[in-house]
Amino acid sequence: MYLQSLRRMSCPTHQVLGGAVLVVCGFGTACGGGSQPTPDFAITVNPSSLSQIVGTVSQPITVNISETNGFADTVNVSVQGLPGGAIVTPSTAFAIPNSGSLQVTFFFPPATSTGTIALTLSATGGGLSRSATLNLALNPVSGTAVLQDTLGQANADTLEIQGLSAGDFTPAYWQNNTLNWVPDVREPMFVALDTSPYQNIYAPWPLEQPNGWRLFYGGWDGSDTPNDRVYSTTTSDFLSFGSRILVIDHGAFQHVNNVNVQQLPDGSMHMICTGGTIDGLNFPTYFSSPDGFTWNGSPEPYQAQLSDIVDIQGYPNYQYGGFNGGNVLFWDNSWILYFFDNNATNSYVFRATGVSPSSVQFQGGVLATGRDPNAVVKFAVGGTWYLMGLNSPGLSYSLSKDGITFGSEQTLFRNLGSFDTFIDSVSFVTHGTQLLGVLYAANAAPVQGPPAASNQIYVRWLQKKIVVTDSSGVQYLPQGSYGPDRQWFQVPASSTIDGTLVVYAEDGLTLLGSGLVRLTGGKSYHLVQP
């Protein structure tokens, strides 16, 4: 019994009693043996290698500190091996918590020697020192990005760069959803007339013409009653607009809106709208014109008739009229009507086809979604591609190789702020094989009824990405676009920027070229290379 109680005490000593070795623990010390784990930390950088052009600011790297065994101290990090004139942001040394991270960027002046260098990130804390290596490939300014003076609209505190519109439709950019959308500095781009309290326009549809675009749209454009109608205007550059024309009056309908138009090689125009009846039903309605001015046999404005409702043969429950906002007419060697039924139990974009848009045969679903299809365009670039734009809730798009089966939706872009919180409709601005931008209607609040409804037309342009960096490492990013091929930049108080220009494709990632520039406020430049 006495020996057992001794064994319960701590820290053994050895005694010999009658030839036997006894293990005796002393009072107040621990048995069990072994030392406590030592607190420690590690530092890593991600990515661990970078490539950048001298005279530019690098992409951010993330410096991570991870603790082990209860390490609790703050870690101080310094960067070693920097060439002369280099700038680290935040400036070295910087502190990171015991289990935290920090983003760091680097700037190397244009005169920095090019080549590969290794930077050491030294970290100290709690009496310990650890390090990580960042490998940097410094590339020369290529001189392939060239600007020329041109005429433009720049203010004294702004400079303008032109020639930035997207190139040919590139499927990979859309598949990867790496798209450089630039909001237009006009917010909104196009507003309703203020000739009455009824100022609510939406559902824009830009139809390409030989000298620009004819922009169709619907709503209450300063009209005398809050009944949706279809209007149009013309533009050569989306900077100035011609006279506004009433094209389709609501006539026998309560509303006619959600317009989209196809034009055939013979010049004829074919229009699908939502026709809202006085009893609250909505149907796709069809109007045609041989010349863009006479619709369904009458000079514009044509008074819409109930006989203009499209016949969708074979679609069940068509008579219940749930077709508001999602009707797209498309010509693809025959007529296709893509539509959405708000009354359907299963949410799908459906497809119907026919020899005439006025009577089509139901074919089935092409995309499982809860959003309205607003636009479909086709590109023959790298194969055949169909692009569908959808809205509500939010804006999305879907790609197809055959126009029959569309792939998973991807987010197009989100609202800019409170003023365009509620987006109503979407369409694509195309120019041949280019997709230049997206028009959409939006308002600040989902207000219903006159006179407060306030949708206006906004735009995002798909453009090359331009980054200007001055000789001290200050970056100048665009304030926004001004039309499909221009961007505006704020200039410093000195009104001059001496630095480096880098040009990326409209995915914002593919490097096209770089050059040394001197830019002055109040001037406009045109990108001639690349």
Image: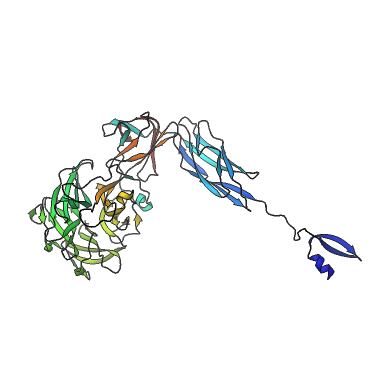
Q: Position of residue 152 (x, y in %)?
A: 26, 33
Residue sitting at x 29%, y 51% = 444
- The image quadrant of residue 280 is bottom left
The number of numbered discs placed on residues in the rendered structure image is: 0
Give the answer, above or below, for where 143 lies relative to 193.
above
Q: Position of residue 184 (x, y in %)?
A: 29, 43
Rendered image coloring scheme: rainbow
Q: Is residue 436 visible?
A: no
Depth check: give the residue in front, 267 or 200.
200
Give the answer, above or below, for where 80 lies relative to 360.
above
Q: Position of residue 122 (x, y in %)?
A: 59, 41
Query: Extreme left residue here?
Result: 298
In the image: residue 420, left or right of residue 13: left
What quarter of the picture does the C terminus occupy? top left
- The image quadrant of residue 325 is bottom left
Depth check: give the residue in front, 357 or 374.
374
In the image: residue 293, left or right of residue 429: left
Residue sitting at x 61%, y 47% = 73
